[in-house]
Image: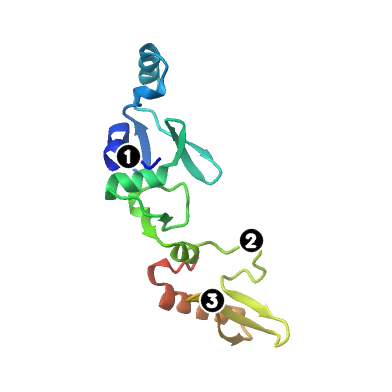
Amino acid sequence: MTLTQEEAHRLFEYKDGELFWKEQSVSNFPTPSYHKRWTTRFLNKKAGSCAGIYVNISIKGARHQAHRIIFVMHHGYMPKIVDHINGKTQDNRIENLRAATHTENLRNCKIPKTNTSGYKNVVWHSQRKKWNVKLTINHKNTSFGLYDDIELADLVAQEVRNKYFGSFARNF
């Protein structure tokens, strides 16, 4: 179920990256008295809980991610992917959210846990005994040189990410 902008504004109030209950749909409840108890208990309370890496909110038995609700509240449409600009998945301030493609979202990822160099897009080339800067550009793995110095390789990787990935280049 996709939430509309109108429904989101009816159900929630947005305050600095968090959602607070304004109203809950009566259809969720078996009796009007239960709805009254719910309204008294949850009205103006923070909505959602963190399960995994995102804040999730249950509406009519369906789970919704808070950042997606916030995006639709402010922009009126729901993109396939909502990217957290600073990479912090629980920072749902609207200024930290943007529409993205799958590729753009991947470009804004942290250094993978499997990374052994400690630097994004820098890998050890065991045959040449040098640091290799490698990025995927237009679905092709591309090398941007071999370097003796890992800090220089990291600097080149940052410059290449900025050039090819623009605002989605994550250099931290």
Which residue is depicted at the point 37% across and 37% down? 19
Mark 3 surroundings within 10 Å by alpha-carbon count, few (fewer than 14), some (14 through 19), many (20 or more): many
CB atoms of marks 1 and 3 within 8 Å? no
Give the residue at mark 2: 113
Answer with left or right where residue 161 lies relative to residue 40. right
| Residue drawn at (32%, 39%) of the image | 15
Label 2 secondary element: loop
Q: Which residue is mark 1?
A: 15
Marks 1/2: CA–CA distance: 33 Å
In the rendered view, would you say 3 is above or below 99?
Answer: above
For disc 2, the neighbor class at 10 Å (few under 14, some 14 to 19, many from 20) is few
Q: Earlier in the sequence, mark 1 or mark 3?
A: 1
Q: Quadrant of residue 46?
A: top left
Foreground label between 1 and 3:
3
Identify which amino acid the numbered label 3 is placed on: Leu
Q: Which mark is residue 135?
A: 3
